[in-house]
Image (tube, rainbow, N blue to C red):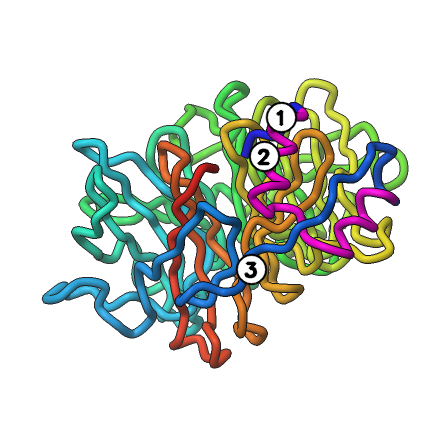
Amino acid sequence: MKINNEMNRRNLIKLGLYGAGSLWANLVVGSSRAAPEPVQLLPPDRNGVRLPAGYSSRIVAESSVSPLGGCKYVWHASPDGGACFADQGGGWIYVSNSELGDAEGGAGALRFDADGKLIDAYSVLQGTSRNCSGGATPWGSWLSCEEIDDGRVWECDPQGVEAAVVRPALGVFRHEAVAVDSLNRKLYLTEDQVDGCLYRFTPFNYPDLSAGKLEAARVVSGDTGRVEWQEIRDPLASRTETRFQTSATRFNGGEGIAYFGGKVYFTTKGDNRVWVFDINSQVLSVLYDDSAYINPVLTGVDNITVASDGSLYVAEDGGNMQVVVIANDGAIYPVLEVAGHDMSEIAGVAFSPDGSRLYFSSQRGKSGDELDGLTFEIHGPF
């Protein structure tokens, strides 16, 4: 969402994008800029979503229910990470993981036409476990990550035509998410462990992911600063768990990750931080830390995506069940909130190719049951 000038800031205030009270404190404590007058999001709409004026929501899929009349695919339980892909005729496809365990996970897809009408739903991956998040590739595939001790990455066809292919060269560990730096032809991966690592994978023959070099990040001194990369000699973890093969820096619960403009952004849930790694300088910094604020707007950091202007959209696992924007000028504000879903988490935030729609799921819905997940679409002037 573009907020690079004062006119856009005023528009956001009118739209109600700035939360009250706690956000005011954040802007005063976290920045020397004058804080705008705080305005609440509107009351929940018929789908239980609080939005700014001018935005609307719809539920596009429900776990355990077929999204379309006569459609054979029943929308999966426990929807998690997701991404959008351009489709023929100006339409698009939203791919979503299922975090079910015991080989009942996988990923499904929703296909929309150019007008946003839902026209199909189908599976793109089956028989895997706890497919948490993942990442879209520039060549049009979905990388689905298993969050189990012997988890692997599966490369999936969003069209559902080609069978998914396992990519063990990307490492065997408790995967969370992956982002691709197409300029330097490298992939970055997070690990959901209290002592997890940040990994980098360099394909030997980009974009072929069947072979390459896996490395882990080590900050030279302290928690932030210049990074060096240490090679993982046994990516399959046949003898030693991947994260224990080097003296890499530990991150407390790696979650979502995204690449934009020469930088890699990722979140860690154990300390509620958003990190930024500058690829050119090879320097790691903390972009957001909830402990720096009296009343933090953003807690329970989880999935993350980036808008076309570089603003970060961070989903909350718990917290206030919001999607929170970290804007280019440092402003932090919720763009939506799902009411009554306190036992759930928000996951799978992703923009449609034209940036006019934002997709996400409430993984366990109002009941807190993994069989009651809901997938939403938000339409508005993002």
Is residue 280 toward the left or the right of residue 294 in the image?
Answer: left
Label 1 close to label 2 by CB (< 8 Å): yes
Residue type at mark 1 is Met
Residue 133: tell me if it is visible.
yes
Numbered label attached to residue 266: none
For label 2, the SS is helix
Residue type at mark 2 is Asn
**133 or 353: nearer the eye?**
353
- Circle 1 packing at 10 Å, graded few (<14), some (14-19), many (20+), is few
- Indicate yes or no whether the magenta region holds residue 19: yes
Q: Which residue was labeled with disc 1?
A: 7
Q: Which residue was labeled with disc 2?
A: 11
Q: Residue at x 78, y 34 (%)?
A: 285
Residue 86 place in picture, x, y as percent: 29, 34
Q: Which residue was labeled with disc 3?
A: 337
Whole-angstrom CA distance, mark 1 to mark 2, is: 6 Å
